[in-house]
Amino acid sequence: MYHRDRGGAGSVPSRSELVGRPLDRKRINDALDKHLEKSSPSTSRALNSKDKERLSVPSTSAGKSQLDHRDSRAASLSENKCSDAMMDCSCTGDMFTEEQNELVESAAEMLYGLIHVRYILTSKGMAAMLEKYKNYDFGRCPRVYCCGQPCLPVGQSDIPRSSTVKIYCPKCEDIYYPRSKYQGNLDGAYFGTTFPHLFLMTYGHLKPQKAAQSYVQRVFGFKIHKSS
């Protein structure tokens, strides 16, 4: 799964690798949220046109819905707020206070995730994810008629903390909860809504045919009519 190659490109490090020690995740997230809410305009950088172009996520469609634009802007804003939060924390001497340390660690983790979602859309990131896909690192589709089709990670939103990561099956074109608890705790925004679809467009030969079979309900061997 994701944790097999924590040091490789396109992989997501464990919590201990990110922060160096076990943490109360809820307490850290609350601290970051509190800091971001009370941030003044002077501590949050305004994006100019060059920044927006640099931070925007590549799109494969000619026109995107208003919700997609909001997700993209919100993700870019979150990345800037994370970096601002890390810079805004002043320390006495060489030591952070406990609250500042938790804030920086949480902001660093989110910033890493938002960088990761952009990296996996690059050619190098795609190549790294291709190897993981071939090794079934992201799991297989639990649907019987998909016959163990390898899946790809996907987020239901590009906004951090909206939902956890899911796995997308290219054969039945549906999403499922990952079997691993470790995978299920990852933020879906760290993989984004674009990746699996852009991946299959890039490597078109890997896209399987749609599943032809579907489950048929029967009672004593007889098919159940749809109107029943």
Image: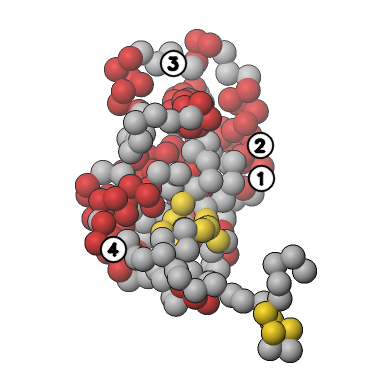
Question: Residue 13, how many percent across, how many down?
Answer: 42, 55
How many angstroms separate mark 1 from mark 3 (CA)?
A: 27 Å
Q: Which comes sooner in the sequence, label 3 or label 4? A: 3
**What is the quadrant of the N terminus in the image?**
bottom left
**Amino acid type, label 4:** Leu
Q: Are marks 1 and 2 in contact (CB under 8 Å)?
A: yes
Question: Residue 51, how many percent across, how many down?
Answer: 33, 20
Q: Which residue is mark 1?
A: 26
Q: Nearer the viewer, residue 62 or 18?
A: 62
Q: Which comes sooner in the sequence, label 2 or label 4? A: 2
Specify the label residue 45 is tagged with.
3
Q: Which comes sooner in the sequence, label 1 or label 4? A: 1
How many angstroms separate mark 3 from mark 2 (CA)?
A: 22 Å
Q: Nearer the viewer, residue 153 or 87?
A: 153
How is the structure coloured here?
secondary structure
Q: Are marks 2 and 4 in contact (CB under 8 Å)?
A: no
**Amino acid type, label 1:** Lys
Please report the residue visible at 26 percent of the width from the left and 44 percent of the height from the top. Answer: 122
